[in-house]
Amino acid sequence: MPDLVNENQTITLLEQEIPVKMSKLPQANLKFYPDNPRIYSIIHGSTEALGQHEIEARLRKLEHVNALVQSIKSHGGLINPLIVRNGDNVVLEGNSRLAAYRILAQKDAIKWGYVKCTILPSDIADDLIFALLGQYHIIGQKDWAPFEQAGYLWRRCKQHGIAADKIGKEMGIAVRTINHYIEIYQFMVDHNEEDPDRWSYYEEYLKSRKVQKTRQENPQLDKIIVAKIKSGEIKKAVDMRDKAVKVIAVGGKTLRKFMDKKNSLEECYDSAVEHGANNHLLKKLENFKEIISDPDTKKELLEMTEPQKQKCIFALNKIQKAVDQTLKKIQ
């Protein structure tokens, strides 16, 4: 049995000093934390409740866990200790490393029997736990996938009732980014999308302003897109970005055929190209039209300092003059 360390220290979370203890604990006595965003994403995709053994079995299959096995083995232990809640021995942070330790212990139970831990008080509040996880994985090492990061932000906002602007101040993240992540995650929840690997599809779909406008005009579009993703018709996230979004942006008969399933994505994309979907000049003009028509642009202009506002007015007048001259030449 290794020498046990018993060092009392503190960490600061949400401006509170939290007492912690450094120690080595038997890894066999530790438990996985179901609310950890990485494990939550695994459970979220399951139709039945998962116990400790099922969670461990799923973690063992993950590529990064097997990479951790080799890293921990080469170092002879952990560089960063697990973070454990006292009393119930739940690993709040470091579940993948615990799974890796369990794999190593199968071959040498004595060498890998004890693991270095930072032990938090048994009564630590949930908001402090989530603040801790955010410090590690959204501000710090950022090893969570976007789906896991979004799940963290979604639960922090929706379940814990923390406003996006407060989360932004805590973590130094733009409120717009937080809201965008929450929007995508909520969309996936609303449409029973349980595959974290499809995150990029929905990110490409929801970030387009043209798509947002078309969704408002065609409420059934969301269900159609989700069905096309799940069926494999939209095979990759890049197909969503480079083909499906362009079909939606072109609109008209091309979009109707896409939504009515009269034509495949490839056929509708070819039609979109014929209508200028890949015309870079047209795209630039349409992007400018979107920017200048956006209510946020007008609001930002009104909130500018007077010198900045005057520069913008000068630029807009120049643009208007150039537009008038160009129209006279090409019409």
Image: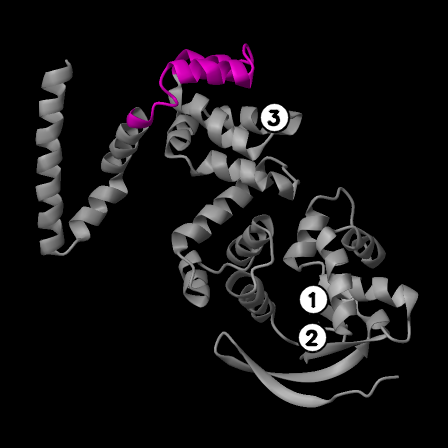
Q: Amino acid at mark 2?
A: Pro
Helix, strand or loop at label 1? It is: loop
- Residue, x 57% and y 41% (percent of image)? 199
Comparing 261 with 273, the one in front is 273
Name the colouring of the figure.
one colour
- Residue range of the region highlighted in magenta in the rendering: 252-281
Please say if 325 is above or below 151. above
* Whole-number angstrom distance, CA of label 3 to CA of label 1: 36 Å
Q: Which mark is residue 81?
A: 2
Residue in the picture at 43% in, 51% down:
177
Picture coordinates of residue 107, whole percent (x, y): 91, 65
Quadrant in which the C terminus appears: top left
**Label 2–label 1 contact, CB within 8 A:** yes
Q: Are marks 3 and 1 in contact (CB under 8 Å)?
A: no
Q: Is residue 86 visible?
A: no
Residues packed near mark 1 inside 10 Å, few (<14), some (14 to 19) or many (20 plus): some
Which numbered disc flags the more N-terminal residue, 2 or 1?
Answer: 2
Q: Earlier in the sequence, mark 2 or mark 3?
A: 2
Label 3 is placed on what type of residue? Answer: Ala
- Residue nearest the viewer, comparing 12 with 1: 1
- Between the C-alphas of marks 2 and 3, the distance is 43 Å
**Residue at image mark 1:** 94
The residue tagged 3 is 227
Give the percent coordinates (x, y) of residue 56.
81, 57
